[in-house]
Amino acid sequence: MTLLDVDFEFRYSSGAGVLCQWKDPVGDPRVTVFLGASGSGKTTVLRCLAGLERPERGHIRFGDHVWFDAARRIHLPPDHRDVGVLFQDYALFPHLTVAQNVAFGARHLSRAAVAARVGELLETFRLRGLEERVPRQLSGGQQQRVALARAVFRRPKLLLLDEPLSAVDRPTGDELREELRTLIRALAIPAYIVSHDRVDALTLADRTVLVDDGRIIQSGTTADVFDHPASPAAARLVGIDTILLGRIAASEDGLATIVVAGQEIRAQAPAEVGHEAALLIRAEDVALARHDVTDSSVMNRWRARVITHAREGPFVRVALDCGFRLSSLVTREAWHRLALQPGDDAWAIVKAASIRALPRN
């Protein structure tokens, strides 16, 4: 098990910056996704790991190897860090053939050794027969495979991928994502992927690192990060649709009554009475009804007015006004059965156990 020890500060010319403090045991060939909005600093973290950017202070260590140490004036260039890098536009050389692109990183190898490695990678990445083509003659998936083959030509210990699917449309991205997952698993190299798309984390990542405003705000297994966001900022990144702020008015048997915009919400008690709390409600946990229900286990039922609705594949996303804004995601069949329209009254129903409550300092 090798420890990746990262503790650095990088400053932009605008004055803003990235402060990255993180330790990751690198052992099994798992996939880690850095998830954050555009401008959050996640790509800067990756570029600093690769040696493409130089932080102002701190250190980056990979096991016994010091990649960067500001105090000791150590800054290893990318080709001395034993990492493979895949850029979001793939950065293939347009005038070089597939074979030449794959072999571009070859150094200190005989012609026979280069030819053998290229042949091995062409086979692994299903590029046999495309050796003499140039990038413009390749599909998006083929270009991705060529770029990935080039990135692993020297058998790196880490693979770094910067938004590998951001330049393609959603249907193409879905297809390439599946192919990318298969290829990364087959390579058996620990990989770090930068992405702004939650789907990448949910489908590719064993572990997810959330980056917000130049800081790592949460990391862990992908399931844990998505199921248990540790803050409102983390909740937004993993797609929690409704985040409400309120004050705890009462607490009994582990359940709190939290007042939000004059409405009472029951949820697991996150703190003592009188404290503020942030409530995280997923849209898929919000049921809709034409009339009030009498099920006492529900705990939360609010009269709501339908504001808007929009189709999302087999679902319909409904915006509601319950005194606070609430989002519901129901099946198209359920929406048709409800026969609701903007301006109609309805009931929003949420079980207390479905609401995640966090103490707010």
Image (spheres, grey):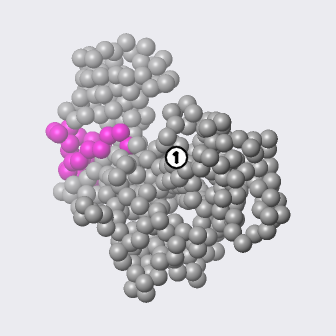
Q: Residue under circle 1?
A: 89
Residue at disc 1, secondary structure: loop
Which stretch did the figure color magenta? 240-267
Q: Is residue 155 above or below residue 237?
A: below
Across and down, in percent, residue 47 comes to 46, 63
Q: How many marks?
A: 1
Q: Which residue occupies 19% across, 33% down? A: 323
Whether residue 256 is visible, yes or no, is no
Closer to us: 119 or 109: 109
Q: Is residue 18 left or right of residue 1?
A: left
Q: Which residue occupies 44% across, 78% down? A: 59
Instruction: Report if residue 253 lies within the magenta region.
Output: yes
Closer to us: 341 or 158: 158
Across and down, in percent, residue 52 comes to 47, 65
Q: Which residue occupies 39% across, 35% down? A: 283
Across and down, in percent, residue 108 comes to 72, 72
Whether residue 71 is visible, yes or no, is yes
